[in-house]
Amino acid sequence: MASALHALGPKKESPFVKVNCAALPDDILASELFGHVKGAFTGAIADRVGRFQEAQGGTIFLDEIGDISNKMQLSLLRVLQEREFERVGESKPIKVDLRVIAATNRDLREKIMSGEFREDLFYRLNVIPIRVPALRERKEDIPLLAQHFIQEFRAKFNKPIVNLSDDALQLMIAYHWPGNIRELRHAIEHAFIMGKSETITVKDLPEDLLAAKTGKAVETSPPDAVLDAETLIRALAQCEWNKARAARSLGISRRTIYRKIAEFGIDETR
């Protein structure tokens, strides 16, 4: 959504910079957003330009804004109010002219009441609020999104999969998608790893969707008989031996991946 706002706006030829605020601790996030000078802290071996400076004249997208600390909220408030910031380890202000888009899945008004989010920062950010409905509230988007991800993974995995069977599509439309679009993307990735024909069928979809169809409780990992060595090796190869990605695509834990590699005696060096 943020990418679309940038692409359709008057600053579309200017930089579009994205930052996941929840992924970094305070000290690293400050350096990431504002940059730092050489020697500002241990490991700062050279000057670094921050994301706000990189986005000069364009758009910066601050994702998961509801998860940042009070200290970082105060730093952001200064940027929004005064349109300037200082790099870590430097007292010289740097002027900035850009548009800020922020996103959160938190209830910020509730966090204000509990003292976890600054009210003044909230009103600085909440100029034009846009509510993005959950995927379960816009089921008509599922066929288009699924086809988009099929095209993405067809190029990535070099597999001739081109569409979904009617039964698979109906199951996806009926599912409640607690993980929203990320979960839909992972479901299509799972289907590409498991599928062997040009059409994704119901049996190629993750266990969560199948459990929802049958009304059974979802297992945290498939039974050992389901995950054989061939399936595991194929999933690992498709994910370039990234065990975390392979685990997500198979709907199992990373610990199970390691256990199965040892159990099947899979030689990663080969």
Image (tube, rainbow, N blue to C red):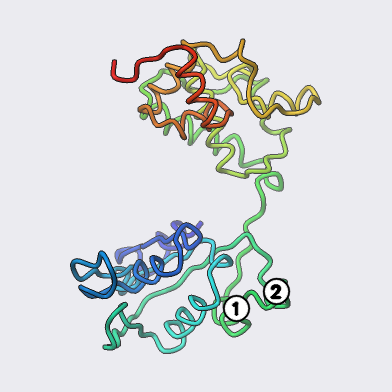
Give residue 85's quadrant in the image. Answer: bottom left
Q: Earlier in the sequence, mark 1 or mark 2?
A: 2
Q: What residue do we see at 70% from left, 74% from top?
A: 109
Q: Which amino acid does label 1 sit on?
A: Phe
Extreme residue in the right direction: 215
| Image quarter in which the C terminus is found | top left
Position of residue 76 in the picture relative to residue 166 (left or right): left
Check the image and report above or below for 265 versus 163.
Answer: above
Q: In the rendered image, which residue does mark 2 sit on?
A: 109
Q: What residue type is labelled 2?
A: Arg
Q: In the rendered image, which residue does mark 1 sit on?
A: 122
Give residue 253's quadrant in the image. Answer: top right
Check the image and report above or below for 159 versus 112.
Answer: above
Check the image and report above or below for 236 versus 13.
Answer: above
Q: What residue do we see at 81% from left, 26% from top?
A: 215
Q: What residue do we see at 35% from left, 72% from top?
A: 52
Position of residue 217 in the picture relative to residue 262 (left or right): right
Q: Position of residue 170 (x, y in %)?
A: 69, 27
The reply to whether discs 1 and 2 touch (Cβ–Cβ < 8 Å) is yes
Q: Position of residue 3 (x, y in %)?
A: 44, 57
Crowding at dot 1, Cα within 10 Å, few <14 / some 14-19 / many 20+, comes out as some
Front-most of residues 195 and 140: 195
Q: What residue do we see at 73% from left, 33% from top?
A: 174
